[in-house]
Image (cartoon, helix red, strand yellow):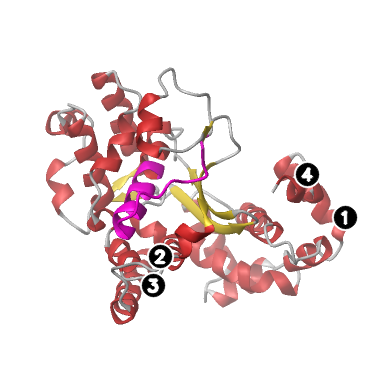
Amino acid sequence: MSERTTSSNWALGIVQALELGGVDCRMIFPELGLDYAALEDPDARFPQDDMTRLWQRAVALSGNPAIGLNMAKVVRPASFHVVGYALMSSRTLKEGLTRLVRFQRIIAEGADLSFRSTPHGYELLLAIHGDRLPPARQSAEASLAYALAFCRWMTGKPILPQQILFQGEPPADLQPFQQVFQAPLKFNAAHYALLFDRADIEMLLPTANEALAQLHDRFAGEYLARFSESRVTHLARQVLCRLLPQGEPKREAVAQALHLSQRTLQRRLQEEGTSFQQLLDDTRRELAEQYLAQPNLALLEVAYLLGFADPSNFFRAFRRWFDITPGEYRTRL
């Protein structure tokens, strides 16, 4: 099974945040079997589970469960790899955050981002996945703190979000969270998210540069293509997204689109820890969330866009995924 990985750029940001909190990473890297020198190699990547162990060890050594929030103090575009520069040259934060979602896997594969318009503004949603170890909550807290600090740094404005959502119980000490986010905090939420005002996200960036934005897009696209070549899961997901509106895609059609035999496709997916059926189900679930966030799409249309010939199959699948009906889910949104 191929492991999810984190770029050395993001790992270096984490290390700087931990060192600010008094943790000696030069000492604990060898303990965890990690190469400290690789932090300086822009092409190096660290397994996701090793990053989880690093967070756990740092919390144990520092006695500070909120140490992830230090990420807000180490803002620099390079932490986001080439994506940081693409963000800076974007016209608005809206354009920048859309780029961040598109190229996010370059920074870290353990995180999934989505960015959407809401009736009251915009929402940047974050999901963190582990491989064999459940992800550390500090990883998600660090990502939210960094994303907000980066937005403030790019705009030169003290952006105050409408609300910050966290999964899990509230911490014993809320003060560090209030200090970093300066916004209402909601715990035990369905997902991690930053909720922004429309005006903040649509304001022009002082660093906007269309020509540079296109150049950075090309660099990021090329890097992602090189990086994804070995990941059949990623390529197969793209094919599924394309084929779903025409009905439920067959494994044969996906294998053909990837110039692979069905057997090779199944074997490669297995090596990456999934199967064709599992990938189809996951892709439909992710797309269902995106489609239901678009109020102009009727539930019937969503069912057909997800390749369900019979809408009742969509309703059954949705209840299995989320424990509620699509209508109830949309009402909650």
**Mark 4 / mark 1, whichever is N-terminal:** 1
**Mark 4 / mark 3, whichever is N-terminal:** 3
Disc 4 versus disc 3: nearer the observer: 3
Question: Residue at 57% of width from left, 55% of height from top?
Answer: 121
- According to the picture, the residue beneath numbered tag 1 turns out to be 312
Give me the C-alpha separation between circle 4 and circle 3.
40 Å
Q: Is residue 292 left or right of residue 224?
A: right
Q: Amino acid at mark 3?
A: Arg
Give me the C-alpha separation between circle 1 and circle 2.
38 Å
Along the viewing direction, whichever of 55 and 333 lies nearer the viewer: 333
Give residue 96's mark: 2
Give residue 217's mark: none
Any part of residue 136 in sight: no
Q: Reply above or below: 304 against 8.
A: below
- According to the picture, the residue beneath numbered tag 4 turns out to be 319
**Mark 4 / mark 2, whichever is N-terminal:** 2
Disc 3 versus disc 2: nearer the observer: 3
- According to the picture, the residue beneath numbered tag 3 turns out to be 91
Is residue 145 shown in magenta? yes
Tell me the magenta residue range: 144-166
Is residue 151 shown in magenta? yes
Q: Label 3 near label 4: C-beta < 8 Å?
A: no
Task: Indicate the quadrant where residue 291 lies.
Answer: bottom right
Question: Residue at 45% of width from left, 64% of height from top?
Answer: 102
Along the viewing direction, whichever of 145 and 182 lies nearer the viewer: 182
Q: Amino acid at mark 4?
A: Arg
Along the viewing direction, whichever of 302 and 271 lies nearer the viewer: 302
Disc 1 versus disc 2: nearer the observer: 2
Q: Amino acid at mark 2?
A: Gly
